Amino acid sequence: MRPLLSICVIFLLFACQSQKEVVSTSTETTIQPTEKTKLVVGIVVDQMRYEYLTRFENKYGNDGFLRLINEGFNCKNNHFNYVPTYTGPGHASVYTGTTPKNHGIIANNWYDKFSDSFVYCAGDTTVQSVGTMDKAGQMSPHRMKTTTFADENRLFTQMNGKTIGISIKDRGAILPAGHSANAAYWFHGKDEGHFISSTYYFETLPQWVKDFNATNPAEKYLKDWDTFYDINTYTESGSDLNDFEGGFRGKDTATFPYDLKALSTTNGGYNILKTTPYGNSLVTDFSIAALDGEQLGEDNYTDVLTVSYSSTDYIGHNFGVNSKEIEDVYIRLDKEIEKLLNALDAKVGKGNYTVFLTADHGAVNVPTYLESVKIPAGYFDGAAFEEQVGNITIETHKVSSFLKNISNQQIFLDREKIQQLGLDLVAVQEAIVNQIITFDQVYKAYTASTMSTTQFTKGIENLLQNGYNQKRSGDVLFVLDPAVIQYSKTGSTHGSPLNYDTHVPLIFYGNGITKGSTTTHTTIPDIAPTMSALLGITFPNGATGKPLEFVLEN
């Protein structure tokens, strides 16, 4: 028996070593939960490239991002597996465990080929605003076709487990919370500076929200925005004065400091706070108020709190990913994460809650900056492209253009007109693809027919297919060259299938989570099934991701 025992031991050692090559975990004993987690907190940071965790690491304290990393599980090679990478699709995909192909949120705004008009991913004229007279509250999740894991938790607990969604952006609050949420709240700026909601959830704001708004929470943040540390120590970003940033109306240069009180008069009143770190501060303040106001994590039913920090996106769009402003907002966001975790410790109890942190997309470096350092980049002229595509249909078929719309790098055709002319739709689509693929700055192009009939398992083609929704997407899909964008010459944007847009953080922490890290490829749709497996509930009904077993304790 002894030789056989030796062989078994050797085999087990080999198996363990093989596993370590994939996943590195700590030998330190984690807190063993005595019961199911009381509260799941999903944190989405808008426009957060993975590198922000490593690039600014020396500026972070020990109790924010680094607490999550050091005491949780860090998935270092996490990506979006579809295109386009926008805020609406990103938030929906995180919580539904699938892609736009299934959940239907194909962009923030998209052309609806049935109504011949544009629709907004969270817009809903059948509901009314709550907390404001402005139309900013006419929102709901009705365009999202599938459930979130928060919905499934509500069903599992017979609607006893609560779900609350919070963000500066309406879509960042509404889509994660799902269809059955108790509430979603978002910030309405202008001359009000309050958190609002819609009649989709209730007819009047809860008293705790009214009390919070009554303190005029935004007013205290209309102050100077200067760097948290000495600006000379911000060596991880470019110069403060450069040609690649937008800035604020009323200030000649996009340089620190910013007098927000004075600048607010020409920058949308309280809306200016969205493009500063203080927008994130408002979200933290309101989230902590929600812990008390909704008594989250205080009973035997698991609750879900979704928190989306959006100011990082506004700042990235305005100043670019290499700006001092981006470095400062992440240094300050680290403090917001610390503040939120401390509140969770105090109100729910360390070891009683579970957190995940990820992003809804990344962002590209400002192309003018990339060009200045000899990296291929550029700007796409959408109007010229649309004219060229229209001419293709005229010259090829000797009829007036049957182009309906070009948006979100999709071409929509007038199918009714094509049918009346006796033309073959697939042939028309293919003719356009064959033409536009020859255009400068067009990197890839495919027809809707190809997306529907050909199975792609890797590459950009697979990402296009995962983002293609047969009912809502266009007739032709195209991708621009790397670092080529249709945007202003200042600031950053996103939306592509390239790594700068797809590679984002994914960290799990708290109850039920082991400690460690991995460079194994993971995808955004894996998050919701992982949370469902942790809670022992049904996966979201359209989920295509898989549970990440290596992040969960046995």
Image (spheres, rainbow, N blue to C red):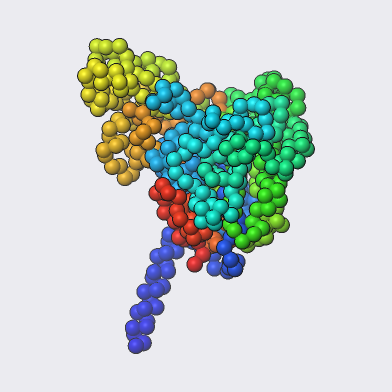
**Quarter location, residue 83:** top left
On the image, the x and y values in percent for residue 154 come to 54, 52
On the image, the x and y values in percent for residue 367 come to 49, 28
**Quarter location, residue 381:** top left
Front one among 151 and 407: 151
Q: Residue drawn 36% across and 28% down?
A: 474
On the image, the x and y values in percent for residue 345 come to 68, 57
Q: Measured along the vertical axis of the image, is residue 53 above or below residue 272?
A: below
Front one among 316 and 392: 392
**Quarter location, residue 426:** top left
Front one among 175 and 420: 420
Q: Measured along the vertical axis of the image, is residue 272 above or below residue 396?
A: below
Direction front: furthest residue: 203
Report the number of discs. Answer: 0
Q: Residue drawn 61% across and 27% down?
A: 135
Q: Quadrant of the N terminus?
A: bottom left
Q: Residue drawn 67% across and 30% down?
A: 132
On the image, the x and y values in percent for residue 331 come to 66, 43
Q: Residue drawn 60% across and 24% down?
A: 246
Front one among 453 and 79: 453
The answer, for residue 503, to whether it is visible in the render is: no
The answer, for residue 266, to whether it is visible in the render is: yes
Q: Measured along the vertical axis of the image, is residue 167 above or below residue 3?
A: above
